[in-house]
Image (cartoon, grey):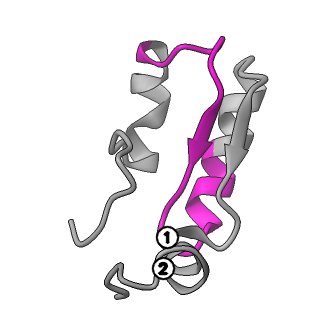
C-alpha cells in the first residue's frame, strides 16, 4: 500500500461480501487509484440501499495532484 487517506481497504472483488460491515446511515467516500473501480463500488452500494455514498472523482491520484501534493504518486 503506497498511500491511504485514512480509509478502510476493501478491494472491489470483496465488497459484496464485506458491505454488511459498513454502516449505510453514515456518509461513505469510496476511492481507488483513478476513480474507476470506486465508481463501480459506489454503484453497487447504491443498488444495495446505501444512500450516502460518494466517489472521489479522479481517485487518489487526483487527490495527490490537487489536494495533498506531498502524497506520493504511483
Closer to us: 1 or 19: 1
Residue drawn at point x = 33 percent, y = 59 percent: 4
Image quadrant where residue 38 sits: bottom right
Q: Which mark is residue 60?
A: 1
Give the magenta part as a residue range: 21-41
Q: Is 38 on the left or on the right of 42, as rendered?
A: left
Q: Secondary structure at mark 1?
A: helix
| Residue 62: image location, x then y, percent | 59, 79
Instruction: Name the mark nearer the viewer: 2 or 1.
Output: 2
Q: Which mark is residue 25?
A: none
| Residue 35: quadrant of the picture | bottom right
Residue 3 highlighted magenta (yes or no): no
Q: Position of residue 11 (x, y in %)?
A: 38, 48
* Residue 34, image x, y percentages: 57, 75
The residue lying at 46 percent from left, 48 percent from top is 12
Horizontal side of residue 18 vs 45, given as left or right: left
The reply to whether discs 2 and 1 touch (Cβ–Cβ < 8 Å) is yes
Q: Give the vertical position of 10 relative to 22 (above or below).
A: below
Of residues 13 and 73, the one nearer the viewer is 73
Classify 18 as above or below 68: above
Residue neighbourhood size for the residue with mark 2, other residues' Cα within 10 Å, grouped as few (<14), some (14–19), many (≥20): some
Q: Say what secondary structure mark 2 lies in.
A: helix
Residue that mark 2 sits on: 64
Vertical arrangement, residue 43 with respect to residue 19, above or below:
below
Q: Residue at x 65, y 74 (%)?
A: 58
Number of on-image labels: 2
Residue 32: x and y in percent read 49, 62
Q: Residue furthest left?
A: 1
Label 1, residues with CA under 10 Å away: few <14, some 14-19, many ≥20: many
Amino acid at each position: 500500500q503506497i498511500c491511504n487517506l485514512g480509509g478502510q481497504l476493501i478491494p472491489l472483488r470483496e465488497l459484496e461480501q464485506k458491505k454488511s460491515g459498513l454502516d449505510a446511515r453514515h456518509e461513505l467516500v469510496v476511492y481507488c487509484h483513478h476513480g474507476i473501480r470506486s465508481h463501480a463500488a459506489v454503484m453497487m452500494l447504491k443498488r444495495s440501499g446505501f444512500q450516502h455514498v460518494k466517489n472521489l472523482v479522479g481517485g487518489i491520484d487526483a487527490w495527490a495532484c490537487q489536494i495533498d501534493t506531498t502524497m506520493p504518486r504511483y
